[in-house]
Image (tube, grey):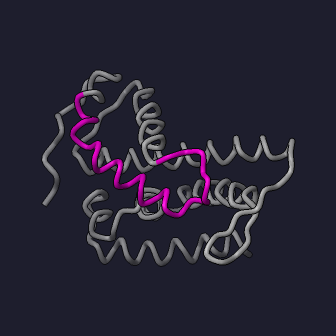
Amino acid sequence: MADPPLASSAPEGPDGLDGLFPLVYDELRRMAHQRMRHERGGHTLSTTGLVHEAYLKLAGQTRAEWRDRGHFLAVAAQAMRRVLVDHARRHGAIRRGGGTRRVSLDEAEMAVDEQADALVALDVALTRLAALDARMCRVVECRFFAGLTDEETAAVLGVAPRTVWRDWVKARGWLHRELYG
C-alpha cells in the first residue's frame, strides 16, 4: 500500500519544506544515524549536522514536489549522499595541503584521506550506475546512504522487497567491479 500523499503539489521553496520537515525529522535522524555509524571516528559531521545540511540542500530546491512520504525520504537520501560526498571532497582538498592522520576502523588501519577518496570514487561510480540503471542507483542511495532496510526501500521506491534485494546484490557487484577492477 502506497504512502498517503503529502500534498498534491507541495508548495515551492522552503515554506512547504518547513511544514514537512518536522513530520519526518525523526526518520531523517534515524537515517543519518545509520549512515554516520559507518563513518570514520572523529568525523566532523554529526548526525544532526547531516540532517540539517540535507535540509539546506532540500530547501534550496526551487520546484519541490513530493508525491508522498516515501518519495520525500528518497530525495532526502540523495541529499544526504550529496552532503557526505561534498564533505569528503572538502576533506580531500584540505588534506592535500597537510599530513595524513591515521584512525582505526574495525581493527584495520585506514588513512582518513583514503576513506574520503573512496566516498568520492563511490559517488562517481554511482553516477555511472544511474546512467545504466536509475533504480539500482536509488536502491544504493536508500540502503547505503540512508540506511533503509529492503522493506523500507521497497516502500520508498514502490517496488517489491525482493526486487530491492536483487537490485542491491547486482548494484554491489557492479560497484565492486567498477571500484576495484
Image quarter hosting the C terminus: bottom right
Q: Tell me if residue 40 is in the magenta stretch.
A: yes
Q: Work out whether residue 155 can be spotted.
A: yes
Would you say 160 lies left or right of 103 here?
Answer: left
The residue under the point 35% across, 22% down is 13
The residue under the point 41% across, 35% down is 55
On the image, the x and y values in percent for residue 114 come to 75, 61
Quarter of image, res 56 = top left
Please state the extent of the stretch shown in magenta in the rendering.
19-46
What is the count of numbered marks? 0
Would you say 50 lies left or right of 121 here?
Answer: left
Q: Nearer the viewer, residue 144 or 181?
A: 144
Q: Nearer the viewer, residue 111 or 179?
A: 111
On the image, the x and y values in percent for residue 104 come to 68, 69
In the displayed structure, would residue 75 be above or below residue 159? above
Would you say 93 lies left or right of 78 here?
Answer: right
On the image, the x and y values in percent for residue 37 come to 49, 62
Would you say 66 lies left or right of 92 here?
Answer: left
Q: Tell me if residue 5 is in the magenta stretch.
A: no
In the displayed structure, would residue 66 be above or below residue 29? above
